[in-house]
Amino acid sequence: MSERPRGLLVPITTPFDPSTGDVAPVHLRDHARTMLSAGAAGIVAAGSTGEASLLSEEEYRQVLEWLRDVVPEDRWLVAGAGRESTRATVAACRAAAEGGANAVLVRAPTYYAPVITPAGLLGHFLAVADQSPVPLLLYNFPKYTHIALSEALVAGLASHENVWGIKDSSGDLKNFAAYRDAAPNWTLFIGSGALYYAALELGAAGAIAAVSCFAPDATAQIGTAFEAGDRAGAGAAQERVAPLHSEIVTRRGVPGVKLAMDIVGLPGGPVRPPLTGLGSKERDRITKLLRRADLL
């Protein structure tokens, strides 16, 4: 890919067979095709929404191979490649490249978060960037990693030719703007479907938003309308998407996303333990939200 990614990249879920618990490749491919048909610029595989930390390394490789078969060469395939050690992260980046990924999304290590120093974290990302065969997008998601990627860290990586940008899932637009100022040449993605319109006004290249897994058309419309100069249309789409992000993605996580997919007729299916599915009251609430957004 000669140009950097822009637009909506859908961080798809990983479907599991309800009987065996194995990854279900037919559903995986079908979901990817649906997202691309809705206007997605690409697919993000094995990220937070894809239950990446619950996949084996063999499953990780298989997921990428199955998706590369259906993601056209002119669309992006980005692989989540964050691991707990620098060595393992580099290995995941290499596996992603071998599986056909165009870029990798790399989070901070989580287990030793309280004792990882700023210098150690910078050294980690520099080493990964030096050795990865494909470009990096950093991934800031302090809710799950318990490490917030600082403005100083971004500035320290801003000139590395193999670091292309960052996905910010902090939910803080001031933080997003600080990243933009620290690395003005980077490609920035917002990780919150509720903030897509606002992030575009701040210079975002696009969104990597889990809400698009079950509302791809409405989410994509925010970006396409904005780029076409139709701010009213983009704002109207944002108003539909924002409650879905807040109530389903933020409050209920992957179980909520998969249940919403099931309700709208997409292959959500079960989550992998220790995650648990949602009950009938949650289903009723999510159904009402989807109906209110004209998705049913």
Image (cartoon, rainbow, N blue to C red):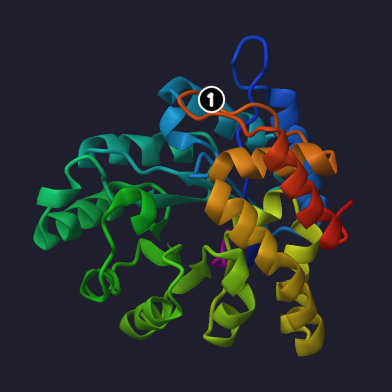
| Dominant SS in magenta | loop
Residue 74 visible in image: no
Quarter of the image where one finds residue 237: bottom right
Residue 283 position within the rendered picture, expressed as x and y whole percent measured from the top left: 73, 40
Residue 291 position within the rendered picture, expressed as x and y whole percent measured from the top left: 85, 55
- Image-based side of 150 in relation to 10, left or right: left
- Image-based side of 146 in relation to 267, left or right: left
Residue 238 visible in image: yes
The region drawn magenta spans: 1-6
Residue 127 position within the rendered picture, expressed as x and y whole percent measured from the top left: 21, 51
Q: Residue at x 56, y 34 (%)?
A: 64
In this rendering, the count of numbered labels is 1
- Image-based side of 171 in relation to 45, left or right: left
Badge 1 marks a residue whose secondary structure is loop
Q: In the rendered view, would you say 184 is above or below 105?
A: below
- Magenta stretch containing residue 3, yes or no? yes
- Magenta stretch containing residue 160, yes or no? no
Q: Amino acid at mark 1?
A: Arg
Q: How packed is label 1: few (under 14 Cα within 10 Å), some, or many (20 or more)? A: many
Q: Nearer the viewer, residue 157 or 139?
A: 139
Q: Residue at x 61, y 69 (%)?
A: 194
Quarter of the image where one finds residue 261: top right
Q: Nearer the viewer, residue 167 or 185?
A: 167
For the N terminus, give its image quadrant. bottom right
The residue pinned by badge 1 equals 272
Q: In the rendered view, would you say 142 is above or below 256?
A: below
- Image-based side of 258 in relation to 284, left or right: left
Q: Residue furthest top?
A: 20
Residue 255 position within the rendered picture, expressed as x and y whole percent measured from the top left: 59, 38
Quarter of the image where one finds residue 236: bottom right
